[in-house]
């Protein structure tokens, strides 16, 4: 990398991929002739004469070859056939967008069955995880659309074809990366009921939505009702509004993702469902809102939160790796391949060791481990992670000191399959990977399995001083932490290498983070270790790897009146700023000063 010769491109393609690590920060590439599988293929070693030697990173040992697994394509692992990718969205920071008041209901609860359809709701109970809709015109069905697309061998033809110049029916699309919309029913001239797609191999976990709309008219009030949420509580009842991206706005005025929606309500509806033969009959919840599109005949994207896809992450890595100075301090390798064959990447960030000191005489730097997107629909976690990586790969005095004192092991996307397929909570195996940390299976939960393997190696060979898993929260405001109080320590349950932590020590890091980030609320932090959380990353890491193990939660909405920006939606910049604050807190609390 960094060469201006004709082999530079080939050199970069081989040198940036899949490094196997030893216990310290010195990378140990696969030896010549070694092999492994990735997505079903066999790794091959490039001809030595075709590849220029890469620049030194950390302390590269002699007589090694660079591994070259360069497959960065998006794999669904499912029968889905994606349309062309969503655009590379313009990322701008709009003016501050206040959290909205809870909207006035646009129907009376007793009249809900007649609100959009004009007819009473059916009483038949759903047992397949989807509501039974008996009225309205079906104008979008992702599964039927996918079958049609597969039969045609691809293409961009929409599910609903506009019938005439006067046809004002909205045209929906969700068959793109991270998209989620199962069905759309037209129930009035400008009124639509939407059904979200369940996570794959589950009959639930609906929260994330992300779809495209076309054929709209400017200044017309459209009403939407998403009718198959499961959660009783939601930030939509506390002022959260959806985000929208208009291609015409982005091109003409440089406006990117921004908040939209009026008359927002989140309420239980009268569509019943049952999970299991003997399970209780419950009702779905509906999100209702109205909006005006800014332009006629635009292409608009709507989502639960600012999207951050697998391809966005790969593009970000390309930017990092294009900087020759960043390549000296940051190295990417494949932690593992997902079930679908997508990359689960591991970044190692640290300053090169002093090669004038013998390797065995230099003390090992302690390790900080960061991870995100084990829950794929929590896109705000990726924006916080991007802020942290931007800081750590920057050139401020604080970043340099952090790299001098620590080795950072970062997995920015633990569940790439769920992200690609538009899941909210799970991966392709249909399980919550954040409940599989105690005993992950290599074949079903590879990212967690290899993450633990990496952390075990770091614990045994140096020391893990901090683990933070980044998440989004759908109910509470502000940004806060879940930690582990020392009173829940159990010598029998904890790894033999672990010493019992001092009382209240888990509160020190979040207390300092509250000083570094105005949006962080120490009063919202909790330090319980409940039995049902024993299999989570936070608790398993605390019992096996480090005293400082946390889940960092960021609201999908924004801050309350006591935190900044007060009563305002968090922007992308706010999430990134929290990532910066996380890094400065590491320096303040853990640097030994």
Image (tube, grey):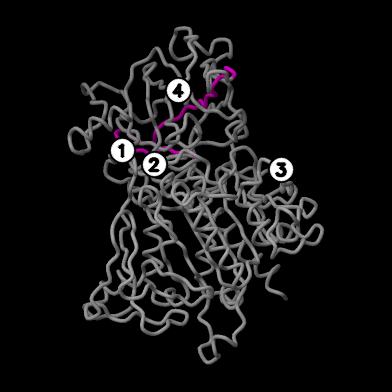
Q: Earlier in the sequence, mark 2 or mark 1?
A: 1
Mark 1 vs mark 4: which is more N-terminal?
Answer: 1
Magenta-drawn segment: 280-304
The residue indicated by pointer 4 is 128
Mark 3 sits on what residue? 530
Residues under labels 1 and 4: Cα distance? 20 Å
User: Which image quarter is the N terminus in?
Assistant: bottom left
Distance in Å between CA atoms under marks 2 and 4: 19 Å
Dot 3 or dot 2, earlier in sequence: 2
Q: Nearer the viewer, mark 3 or mark 2?
A: 3
Sooner in the amino-acid sequence: mark 3 or mark 4: 4
Q: Between marks 3 and 2, how big is the CA–CA gap?
A: 31 Å
Residue 187, located in which quarter of the rendered image? top left
x 34%, y 44%: residue = 76
Q: Categorize mark 2 by other alpha carbons within 10 Å: few (<14), some (14-19), many (20+).
A: many
Q: Residue furthest left?
A: 152
* Mark pair 3, 1: CA separation: 38 Å
* Contact (Cβ within 8 Å) of mark 2 with mark 1: yes
Q: Along the line of sight, which residue is nearer the eye, 85 or 271?
A: 271
Q: Is 333 left or right of 558, judged from the image as shown? A: left
Residue 181 occupies which quadrant of the picture?
top left
Q: Which residue in the structure is indicated by mark 2?
A: 421
Neighbor class of circle 3 (other Cα within 10 Å; few <14, some 14-19, many 20+) is few
Kindly indicate the quadrant of the structure image that contains residue 403.
bottom right
In this view, the mark in front (3 or 1)? 3
The residue identified by callout 1 is 80
Residue shown at 72% from the left, 48% from the top: 525
Label 4's element? Answer: loop
Tell me the quarter of the image containing the C terminus. bottom right
User: On the rendered structure, is 150 left or right of 76?
Assistant: left
């Amino acid at each position: 990398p960094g060469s201006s010769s004709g082999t530079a491109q080939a050199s970069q393609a081989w040198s940036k991929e899949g490094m196997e690590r030893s216990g310290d920060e010195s990378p140990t590439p696969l030896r010549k002739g070694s092999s492994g599988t990735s997505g079903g293929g066999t790794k091959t070693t490039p001809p030595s004469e075709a590849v220029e030697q890469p620049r030194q990173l950390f302390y590269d040992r002699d007589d090694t070859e660079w591994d070259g697994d360069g497959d960065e394509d998006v794999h669904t692992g499912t029968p889905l056939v994606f349309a062309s990718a969503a655009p590379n969205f313009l990322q701008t920071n709009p003016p501050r967008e206040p959290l909205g008041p809870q909207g006035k209901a646009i129907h009376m609860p007793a009249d809900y069955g007649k609100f959009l359809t004009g007819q009473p709701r059916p009483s038949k109970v759903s047992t397949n995880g989807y509501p039974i809709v008996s009225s309205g015109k079906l104008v979008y069905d992702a599964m039927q659309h996918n079958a049609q697309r597969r039969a045609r061998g691809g293409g961009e033809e929409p599910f609903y074809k506009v019938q005439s110049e006067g046809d004002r029916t909205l045209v929906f699309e969700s068959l793109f990366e991270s998209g989620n919309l199962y069905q759309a029913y037209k129930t009035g001239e400008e009124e639509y009921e939407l059904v979200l797609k369940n996570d794959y191999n589950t009959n639930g976990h609906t929260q994330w939505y992300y779809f495209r709309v076309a054929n709209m008219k400017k200044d017309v009030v459209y009403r939407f009702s998403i009718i198959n949420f499961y959660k009783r509580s939601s930030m939509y009842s506390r002022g959260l509004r959806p985000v929208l991206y208009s291609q015409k706005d982005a091109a003409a005025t440089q406006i990117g993702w921004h908040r939209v929606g009026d008359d927002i309500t989140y309420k239980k509806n009268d569509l019943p469902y049952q999970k299991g033969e003997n399970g209780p009959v419950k009702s779905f919840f509906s999100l209702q809102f109205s909006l005006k599109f800014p332009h006629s005949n635009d292409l608009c994207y709507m989502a639960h939160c600012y999207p951050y896809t697998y391809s966005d992450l790969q593009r970000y890595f390309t930017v990092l790796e294009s900087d020759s100075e960043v390549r000296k301090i940051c190295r990417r390798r494949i932690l593992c391949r997902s079930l679908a064959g997508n990359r689960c990447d591991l970044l190692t960030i640290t300053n090169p060791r002093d090669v004038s000191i013998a390797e065995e005489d230099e003390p090992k730097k302690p390790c900080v481990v960061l991870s995100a997107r084990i829950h794929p629909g929590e896109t705000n976690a990726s924006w916080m992670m991007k802020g942290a990586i931007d800081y750590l790969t920057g050139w401020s005095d604080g970043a340099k000191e952090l790299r001098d004192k620590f080795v950072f092991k970062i997995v920015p996307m633990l569940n790439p399959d769920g992200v690609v397929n538009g899941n909210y909570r799970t991966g392709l195996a249909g399980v919550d990977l954040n409940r599989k940390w105690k005993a992950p299976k290599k074949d079903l939960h590879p990212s967690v399995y290899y993450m633990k393997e990496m952390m075990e190696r770091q614990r045994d060979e140096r020391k893990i001083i901090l683990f933070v898993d980044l998440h989004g929260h759908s109910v509470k405001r502000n940004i806060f932490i879940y930690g582990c109080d020392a009173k829940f320590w159990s010598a029998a349950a904890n790894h033999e290498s672990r010493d019992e932590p001092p009382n209240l020590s888990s509160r020190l890091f979040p207390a300092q983070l509250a000083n570094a980030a105005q949006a962080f609320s120490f009063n919202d932090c909790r330090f319980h270790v409940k039995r049902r959380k024993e299999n989570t990353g936070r608790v398993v890491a605390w019992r096996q790897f480090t005293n400082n193990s946390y889940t960092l939660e960021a609201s999908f909405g924004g801050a309350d009146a006591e935190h900044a920006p007060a009563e305002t939606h968090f922007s992308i910049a706010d999430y990134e700023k929290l990532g910066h604050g996380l890094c400065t807190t590491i320096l303040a609390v853990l640097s030994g000063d």
